[in-house]
Each structure stands twice: as structure tokens, then as C-alpha cells.
Amino acid sequence: MNYKQKVGQFGEMLAKKYLERQGYEIIEMNLKVSYKELDIIAAKGDFLIFVEVKTRTTSEFSGEEATGYYKKKSLKYAIIKYLNDNDLWEKEVRADLIVVDINKIKKTAKIKHYKDIL
């Protein structure tokens, strides 16, 4: 596993813990759907939530900027495929983005949660 993958995996673990503290139930993590990976699938209330996690260690290119048109299109495709494959169309669905900004010097992480990004 390379450095970038380790950072991403660490960010997903922090995002998972954050969601659990917020009352979300984690259903699956790192699920491969066709050519796309769904980082976190969670549930809260009546919602099935698909969470894209972006982890950054520099401020050069933000997680928000990395989630542009093509990334959102790919995420939407994976969500639709997941819903079709599991016959879950009766569920309320939402796509969220969690950006984890890691400060290596201070050894801190800041989490930003954007709801309903699609």
C-alpha cells in the first residue's frame, strides 16, 4: 500500500468514527460497484447515505475541488447501480462528502461534512 492509499484509508477511518458519533449506522465501507468504489454507506433515520471521503494533507488542492463534475457523475452511477442491485428504491437516498484535512505538523485533523452534494 502506497502513502496516498494509507492517507486515504486513515481519512476514511476518521470519517467513519465521526459519522458514528453523529448517530449514523455504518452499513458498508469500500464497496466496489462496477469500476467505482463507494467509500462509506451509512443509514440515519429514513435515509441511506452514500459518503465520498476526500483526505488531504496539503492545502494545495482541496477535497471540495477534487469532487467536481466527473467525480459526482461517477458517484451517481455507482449509487444507482447499488440501488438497482439491492432493490432499495423505496429508501430515501442522499450523497454526502466528508473532507478530512490533516495537519501533519500539529498532528490534527479537521472534518468538514457536506450533505446532499448531488
Image: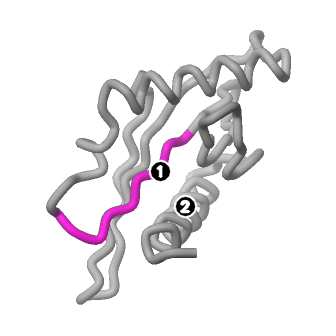
Where is the C terminus found, in terms of image quarters?
top left
Task: Kindly identify the residue that appears in the image at 67 percent across and 51 percent down.
Answer: 30
Q: Secondary structure at mark 1?
A: strand
Residue 86, percent across and down? 84, 22
Front one among 87 and 1: 1
Image position of 94 with respect to 52: above or below: above
Q: Look at mark 2 in the image and give the residue it sits on.
A: 12
Task: Kindly identify the residue that appears in the image at 58 percent across and 75 percent down.
Answer: 1
Residue 11 numbered mark, or none: none
Front one among 88 and 80: 80
Is 91 displayed left or right of 68 in the figure?
right
Q: Amino acid at mark 1?
A: Val
Residue 106, percent across and down? 25, 88
What secondary structure do most residues of the magenta stretch adopt? strand
Is 25 displayed left or right of 77 in the figure?
right
Task: Kindly identify the residue that appears in the image at 23 percent across and 52 percent down.
Answer: 62
Range of magenta residues: 51-59
Q: CA distance from mark 1 to mark 2?
A: 6 Å
Q: Look at mark 1 in the image and give the residue it sits on.
A: 53
Residue 59, percent across and down? 17, 63
Image position of 5 with respect to 27: above or below: below
Asked if the residue under mark 2 is in contact with the one under mark 1, i.e. CB atoms within 8 Å, the reply is: yes
Query: Mark 1 or mark 2: which comes first in sequence?
Result: 2
Q: Residues within 10 Å of mark 1 (few under 14, many from 20)?
A: many
